[in-house]
Amino acid sequence: MSEHVVDLQASLHEYFGFNQFKDEQEAIIQTVIDGRDCLVIMPTGGGKSLCYQLPALMMEGTAIIISPLIALMKNQVDAIRGYSEGDVIAHFLNSSLGRKEIAQVKEDIASGATKLLYVAPETLTKEENLEFFRNTNVSFVAVDEAHCISEWGHDFRPEYRNIRSMIERIGDNIPVIALTATATPKVQTDIVKSLEMKNERKFISSFNRPNLYYEVRPKLGKEQTIKEILQILKGKGGPSAIIYVQARKTTEELAEMLNLNGISAAPYHAGMDAKSRAHVQDSFLSEEVKVICATIAFGMGIDKPDVRVVIHYDIPKSIENYYQETGRGGRDGMEGSCYSFYAPKDIYKLEKFLRDKPVAEREMGGQLLEEVVAYAETSGCRRKFLLHYFGEEYDDSNCGGFCDNCRYPKEKHEVKNEVKTGLEVVLKLKEGYSTKVIVDFLMGKSSKEMNEYEFSKLEGYAAGVEKGEVFWYSILRQALLAGLLEKEIENYGVLKVTAQGKAYIKKPKSFKIPLNRDFSEEKMASDEVPAKMVALDEVLVAQLEDLRRKEAKKKGVPTWAVFQDVSLHEMATHYPVNMEELSSISGVSMGKAQKYGKAFVEVIKKYVEDNEIERPSDMVVRQVANKSRTKVQIIQSIDRKMPLEDIQRTNNLGWDELLEELDIIVSSGTKLDIQYCLETVDESIQEEIYEYFMNATSDSFNDAYQALKDDDITVEEIQLVRIKFLSDIAN
């Protein structure tokens, strides 16, 4: 064993008390000590921090650590001080310090006592700091969370783009180490290029987190989703958990609901002041609070090893976000469970946010969302999907049932000829288009590309109509995973046929795959909400469905306007025998119970008595006391025919939040006259949407959008007419 290895190991024990390095830590540290640039890609919990902490302690001078979050700096500084006799060993320099504190930090650095200095990139832009650093012996610069450099990274920070020029102003030939937990090949290239790394060494650890279980469930409305979250948390004994959501308001509502049902929870979002956020973090770390309901503002600054459950109430904007956030679970190496709730309409919401962005940003954001949809809807191994996204190959036979698709595998279909067809279409379109365009071609859709480039005249156009969209998306995704296709990230996901793919076209062979899940068709929650699935009384369901048909015919409304399938299934599980119990069923408000419920309660009560059924004392979700103020204000505002934009502003609601409130109001049995909001909507369009819902099998917005989007009908028009329909017909 060479001398420097012995020294490194001795130093590791001296400074941190560890006897051995993990994975490639030793080689990384030696590279830094040798003065070479290096890029470190290491999953959350893999020991990235040690890769710059140990060489900083061993080398002459002060290492500058660039970090994006003040909370993260504080935690890191506290951690390194915990291994040292004095606090001067590590400092942070940011906007949270006063003048006196800044002077003390600089004095400690000048004396040579401080080995690690944590700064935000903005700190480096200040001239007085640059002047100070020019006269400081800087051992190296570490760029933590380096994915922030790339626009393709999930936490892009424009300030990170200026790091190279700042380093050059500090001194010549200062070594740089860049570290991140999530970086696709494209992001890796961006990091190296932006930091102008020379002769760099790359250390890329496996992205696999074998202790994490991944599952995606259909999102069947707020009530049902909250019920499932409660079942997950209580079923696992009330563990430390993080629930990620998109909207700040939802963090507060969800935390309130959890507390009401006996689970200590707190919200966390960027709209809270720094003191409140710090208090929530401390409460979570000290176990006073078991569950954090958070926006993406929460995560980077928290190092809690025993988070057992990570739930995505809303699907994230990118796979990078998803991987980073799920990576907060099981950092101690013990088992962690990651559940995501997915509904196609959530994607439409995210797409709406991209509308006003520049074209390049819109296309890039669209591609990132496309990958999220592909992940959610795949029926293949989720672990294999994630690792492939980050450029790592994985044999899905090793998953061992640690994702829902491997635990509950779907039937595989022989698609040898269809794979060949898909590859040929990619070549036919000159390898210049994304997955969506290829599917549009096979489905014979009248899209922009089909019309502009006259693709409809090409042989093979509309050849795949009978198979359906879900089928062709499955084919192309599996071809990517098998290495027959590759994606050009630089060109917004353009598909190319690989050499392996071209060989396959010449000589096709057996190719069996599970088809993607069609979430628009989902009626029930996934397999592990078990009580429902197991307890479902099929005989009673049949009786309730028959009663629903009769009631719908009597009232002249669609069957779903009476009660949806999910509500009937829940009735056949919990056997509600009075109106109060019926109103606790998903999708059944007290207003709806009073309007349609009497006959259903009577049928259920008789069935229970006749069959001597012992009713389950299942969880009834305690509801937050009616937040009537906002709802009353909305109802009164609509009665006064106030413009919706003014209602939004008055109640501090986003468009989707207002729609959700309107949905809740009409679903609870209250009628709303919003006809005045539809004055700008052509009557024929209103009639078309109305007619659609009258003949539809559900009130699904996604189904309506898919059916009507080619008729030049906007999302907003469908949303508003749907609310009017629910008010008029379902009430």
Image (spheres, helix red, strand yellow):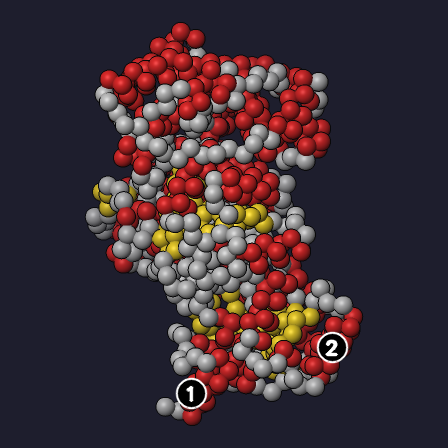
Disc 1 residue type? Val
Q: Quadrant of residue 85?
A: bottom right
Disc 2 residue type? Gln
Q: Quadrant of residue 126?
A: bottom right
Q: Quadrant of the N terminus?
A: bottom left
Query: Residue at the location (56% across, 56% down)?
Result: 283
Position of 172 with respect to 317 (left or right) is: right
| Residue 39, position as x, y percentages in the image | 50, 71
Q: Which residue is mark 1?
A: 5
Residue 351 in view in this figure: no
Q: Which residue is mark 2?
A: 104
Along the line of sight, the residue nearer the viewer: 131 or 664? 664
**Residue lying farthest to the top in this orientation:** 554
Nearer-N-terminus badge (1/2): 1
Query: Residue at the location (41% across, 22% down)?
Result: 582
Q: Is residue 580 above or below residue 338?
A: above
Query: Residue at the location (39% across, 35% down)?
Result: 619
Q: Is residue 567 above or below residue 329?
A: above
Using the numbered discs, state the Cα–Cα distance from disc 1 to disc 2 in whole angstroms: 36 Å
Query: Residue at the location (42% across, 33% down)?
Result: 620
Q: Secondary structure at mark 2?
A: helix
